[in-house]
Amino acid sequence: MYVNTSVVWESLSTSDRKQKFDVYSFVGYNSVIANFEYSPTKDYRTLLQDIQDQSSLKIYGKIMILPKTQKDLKNALKNVNSFSDFLIGVSSLDKDILTMGIKDSRVDVISFPNIQDLDNVTSGIISLLKTHEKFLEISFRDVLRSSKHERSRLFHDIDKFLGVVSANTQILLYGGCERSIVEIRGPREIATIFTAIFNLPLQTSKKIVQSNPERLINILQERISPNHYSHGVKIISQPNKE
């Protein structure tokens, strides 16, 4: 199963949304995770059902928190407590906010959609992500709209980042975060880019675009299971004794 873990859609018209989801299906995705920018007044479930009704793809929801302060993050996480059926993502360049988000059990994904921000991903951040079993989401969207000169610099930034994270690719997700349909690339093409341009082993590339996103979905499905207690732990019903 191929899952695009970061779909931007909220600013689009109904017809443009449908077209975008159709393109994801056409290029090879089986499911997508739609981003919902955090707001304390949003009815996330109704919004998710609305876009699910427009697509044949299975659509999951991810509430994206973009905090400016640690207090912002704390308040937002408190407000999303009742949305365990949604993934929770955090995007920030502040090390203290990132650390707080990674350590919080409610957060699933730390997102860096802009390539130029990847130098904020230090070995310490990677170690925390690994320890707390969180995912790190990246995108190539900047490359797809860049000039030849800019593209060379962006490739260098990605290559440098992959060198830092290479021993911990089990935490990596490719989330397209595409702003328009012209930026959308299929999962097999993304895997080829990782292998052909950045020299990652093919199995590692497949892990980033396929098996890691599948694990993220499995975590969500476990969480909404009626027998779920905590990640990796299920309540087993005891048979009635006569």
Image (cartoon, helix red, strand yellow):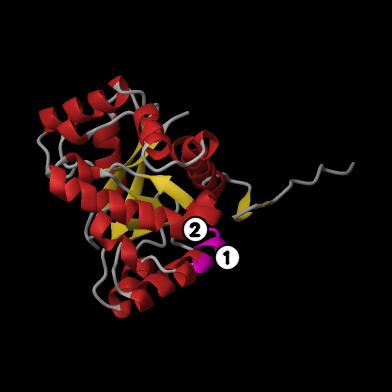
The residue sitting at 35% across, 49% down in the picture is 62
Q: Position of residue 88 (x, y in %)?
A: 39, 56
Query: For residue 134, which numbered disc appears in the image?
Result: 2
Kindly state the secondary structure of the residue where label 1 is placed.
Answer: helix
Query: For residue 131, which numbered disc appears in the image?
Result: 1
Q: Contact (CB < 8 A) between labels 2 and 1?
A: no
Camera-nearest residue between 237 and 70: 70
Kindly state the secondary structure of the residue where label 2 is placed.
Answer: loop
Q: Position of residue 229 (x, y in %)?
A: 62, 56
Residue neighbourhood size for the residue with mark 1, other residues' Cα within 10 Å, grouped as few (<14), some (14–19), many (≥20): few
Q: Amino acid at mark 2?
A: Lys
- Seen in the picture, residue 232 relative to 124 is either above or below; the reply is above
Q: Main secondary structure of the magenta part?
A: helix
Residue neighbourhood size for the residue with mark 2, other residues' Cα within 10 Å, grouped as few (<14), some (14–19), many (≥20): many
| Disc 2/disc 1 C-alpha distance (Å) | 8 Å
Question: Which contiguous range is marked in magenta?
Answer: 127-134
The residue sitting at 26% across, 70% down in the picture is 67
Q: Is residue 130 magenta?
A: yes
Horizontal side of 148 relative to 38 (left or right) equals left
